Amino acid sequence: MIELANITKTYTMGTQEVHALRGVDLTINKGEYVAIMGPSGSGKSTLMNIIGCLDTPSNGTYILNDIDVSDMDDDDLARVRNQQIGFIFQQFNLLARTSALKQVALPLTYAGYSRRDRYERAEAMLKSVGLGDRIDHRPDELSGGQQQRVAIARALVTEPSIILADEPTGNLDTASGEEILAILDDMHQQGITIVMVTHATEVAERTERAIRLRDGLVVNGS
Amino acid sequence: MNVTESFLTAIDSLMANKMRSILTMLGVIIGVAAVIALMAIGNGFSAFVSNEIQSLGTNLVIIVSDTDVSGGYQTLSMSDIDALSDPANTPDVTEVAATVQSTKEIIYQRRNTSATVVGVTSNYFDVYNLSEVSQGNLPTQQDNDTRARVAVLGATIATKLFEDTYPIGEAIKISGTDYRVIGILAEKGGSMSSPDDQIFVPLETAQAYITPLRTRKGEMAVTMLLTTAASEDATDAAIQQITDTLRTRHNVLYAGEDDFQIISQTSLLDTFSTITSALTLFLGAIAGISLLVGGIGIMNIMLVSVTERTREIGIRKAVGALQRDILIQFLIEALVLSLVGGLLGIGLGWLMTVIVAPIMEDAVPVIDLGTIALATSFAAGVGLVFGIYPAWRAARLHPIEALRYE
Ligand SMILES: Nc1ncnc2c1ncn2[C@@H]1O[C@H](COP(=O)(O)OP(=O)(O)OP(=O)(O)O)[C@@H](O)[C@H]1O
Ligand SMILES: [Mg+2]
């Protein structure tokens, strides 16, 4: 369960302060499928990064699965990301010149799995996203949709309880996007909590709840 | 993540970027190769020199006469030989041989050359370790006493003059006078005034007809005395006795300088080891500097690499890499680069010594294990020292900023 209370995030650029989040209260239950919407610059990515423990709030409390993660240090946050959270980014964020199998095995390396277990699980995960015949391909040898599926396999391979997807179909054509959304639907069926940023209403309609942000505040759906 | 995993991750990353890895290693390869090659050449040179000196024999003490510039008078005389042979003066001296030498024109039929002609006492060959002949005989005491015009040739000059002719009994001209060849020495090797290039005649023959040097008092002179000490340990005592005896005989004042020079193997070795160790140190310093430059090159590339790989670091952190994981990965990368570079450098350095070996002739370059150990640990040290800062920078990157980096 994700519990955010009065979360703020302020960036200081020189003398100017940018208030990316200005007091967000939000609860997302286990197993929910939630869309986050809002105009560009409204703070969606900032919020996702905080939920995903990639960044820490300037103020406020964040309780993740009953543990306060608001002011954990760098390494503790890394452990939380590794064990409980899977990320899917708009730009895929795969390692260059690295095979799909190694990409997917990467989180397991940091989780301390043996080499054999890593590759077994990674291969199984790539099969489950339909890339069983592409495990030795590197990112530049894969289509955008395939790259995003590698990223999904990487997000899922540690069996996280939460998947965070920041505009996962933003760089894809409709057909590839549909494949990705189908996988997300499937994950939802399996009971994984999914939070997805999207600009498209028809994408948001597939979710159970749409949260709207404007100027760093939740205006609807908390 | 344990160290083995970090190591494999680092190897993966290096293999994924082969060109970058090779270029980074280049500095270390060249640095280590320079260390190996220069040290090997230095070692070879000093081994060569000390070998030459040791071939003189450990007990040998040589006394060289001073030459009076104006009249060409010598300070060592025939009577000095007798004085040094007397155990009452020099109890630790066992043998005394003497020579006069000068460079003369040598003619055999139509061939002519110039060579050092050495007039020697008959015990010279024993004292100097030259008593082995390949053909004929050595001059006898009687040849000396009768001032016989006989000559013994070193191996090289014999070949030069006679080629295929059987030399024994042939006559060669020294300064225009005929000498009968009675023996050829076995080849000795060596290059600093090697006996292979010299011609030997009895001492008194030389004094009478070839090198008629005298002392200021008019005695027949010798240019060099060769003495052997009773043992290696007795060398210092022998030198002292010789010095005392000669100074007294030559009436050198208490405050005056010796009018002769004493050379022993120990004194030569001391001098040369000072020179060669300075040389080796100098070469080592040059090589060390090139290693340092190689190390800075590694740091430079690692820093560039951290910047260039900011996104990679962001991705690794996003999926759960700890600061330590990133730190160790980058450190191991630097270490592997410098160690592999070090090994390749050893290979290259070895290749360089093989290439220069023919030019160095007798001073064959010697690669010793110490040099290899030194170069390898230096390379590893370079990797560690110059890898730490970039690795630390990488480890501390903020995941979001790293992911945003374009
Ligand atoms: N590192 C940063 N430094 C300074 N300002 C930042 C930083 N990151 C985000 N911001 C600012 O915070 C605000 C919210 O940014 P955010 O990326 O969360 O928007 P978004 O809703 O994801 O927009 P988009 O739909 O375009 O992705 C913006 O005004 C942005 O300029
Ligand atoms: Mg965004």
Image (tube, coloured by chain):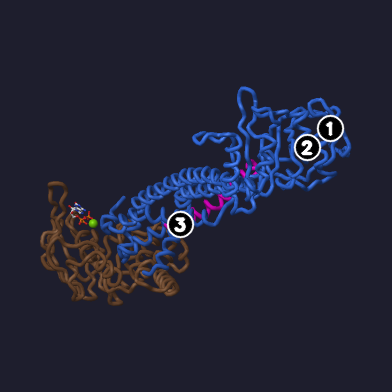
Q: Position of residue A207 (x, y in %)?
A: 24, 69
Residue at (22% x, 73% y) in the render: A32
- First-in-chain label (2 vs 1): 1
Q: Position of residue B328 (x, y in %)?
A: 36, 62
Q: Nearer the viewer, mark 1 or mark 3?
A: 1
Residues packed near mark 1 inside 10 Å, few (<14), some (14 to 19) or many (20 plus)? some
Answer whether labels 1 and 3 touch (C-beta < 8 Å).
no
**Residue that badge 2 annotates:** B202
Q: Nearer the viewer, mark 2 or mark 3?
A: 2
Amino acid under disc 3: Ser
Ligand 2 picture quarter: bottom left
**Residue that badge 3 annotates:** B377
Residues packed near mark 2 inside 10 Å, few (<14), some (14 to 19) or many (20 plus)? many
Mark 2–mark 1 Cα distance, whole angstroms, equals: 11 Å
The secondary element bearing badge 3 is classed as helix
The secondary structure making up most of the magenta span is helix
Q: Of residues A59 and B32, which is closer to you in this image?
A: B32
Badge 1 sits on which subunit? B
Discs 1 and 3 carry the same chain letter:
yes
The chain in blue: B
Q: Is residue A140 left or right of residue B321?
A: right
Mark 1–mark 3 Cα distance, whole angstroms, equals: 64 Å
